[in-house]
Amino acid sequence: MERRRWVTLLIIMCLFAGSTGRGLEIKNKVPSPLYNHTLATILVEYASAVYMSDLTQLFTWTCSRCDGLTTGFEVLELIVDVENCLQAFVGVADDLDAIVIAFRGTQETSIQNWIEDLFWKQLDFEYPGCTDGKVHHGFFNAYNNTIVRSGILDGVSRAKEMYGDLKIMVTGHSMGGAMAAFCGLDLALIYGGNNVEVMTFGQPRIGNAAFASYYSEVVPNTFRVTHEHDLVPHLPPYYQHLPHKTYHHFPREVWLYNLGFGFLIYEVEKICDGSGEDPDCSRSVSGNSISDHLSYFGVEMGCDTSSKCRIVMAPSLSSYGKVDDKGNFALSRSPPSKFISKTKSQPQMSDH
């Protein structure tokens, strides 16, 4: 207990020391996308729903978080990597005319240990095709070297075959946001950057400045939403005196914070600069809150159970997929139970 208290104190002190100063400017050669508040409030519900442990309810979209702005969504692929405690889904949202992909974040029972481990992680993987770019080995592998990637690509391919050339929207919270970023990059390289939108919530840093520049060019339609004093977007730490070697966020950040006092408090959505490390956004405060990490736009983020990697699934779902020798599996729905016209217009990031 004493060790954890000292580690937490050290994290906060280091983050505070590195929170000031302007970050290395990201070379962004493409026009910045327009932030869409309505889309953010929709995607945050998908990022919350993917945490659900009852796979029967999640696959049939009848879970307690599978309503509201996501009503009518249909899951085509539900991927569960039991070995690494990973979960994601691919589905089609007819109101968005889009394929939606969501990744689960870290389980709450292990979040403190995860934060401590993340604090000490170093860049140790060079991303192919990106000169001098380095990424977080764990996040990269969680998406690229598990059952998750093949399940996602299969789900997207089938969705496009059944529904036409719909736009792809990728989301996730916490570690799920990191995986969503790597997925968005992967899909942009396959289908083109104009066909992929990424919006994450409470995402940690995943690479250095060279990678951030590369990412922003390949996946320009990207937003990272951060909330108040959320601890995770401050990790792994940014060291301003080592701009070329340190972890560095890619743009564009949207910082949610409260303004006012008493009964006159309202939430502000500040669209930050193109550096990825705007000193006037989340870096302007100390990242010391787990509670801010677990709530975005008033939506509960995190698991619905305290049991690590708990799975509930009806036997009838076994006919929808196969289990490998490590217990990992993907549930696939084909053909779907509904149809979306291939001639519908594509959604935009703006509110026009």
Image (tube, rainbow, N blue to C red):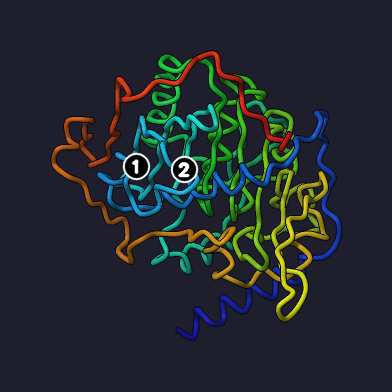
Instruction: Tell me the amino acid under the disc marked 2.
Output: Thr
Among the 4 quarters of the image, the one containing residue 267: bottom right
Q: Which residue is mark 1?
A: 61
Rendered residue at 27%/40% (across/down): 328
Q: Is residue 282 left or right of residue 147?
A: right
337 displayed left or right of 294: left
Helix, strand or loop under label 1:
loop
Q: Quadrant of the C terminus?
A: top right
Where is 286 relative to 89, above or below?
below
User: Which residue bears the numbered disc 2?
Assistant: 70
Q: Are marks 2 and 1 in contact (CB under 8 Å)?
A: yes
The residue that appears at 63% across and 20% down in the rendered structure is 192
Type of the residue with mark 1: Trp
Q: Position of residue 94 (x, y in %)?
A: 48, 29
Whether residue 345 is situated above or below residue 124 in the rendered picture: above
The percent position of residue 270, horizontal first and vertical second, equals 77, 55
- Report the front residue among 70 and 113: 70
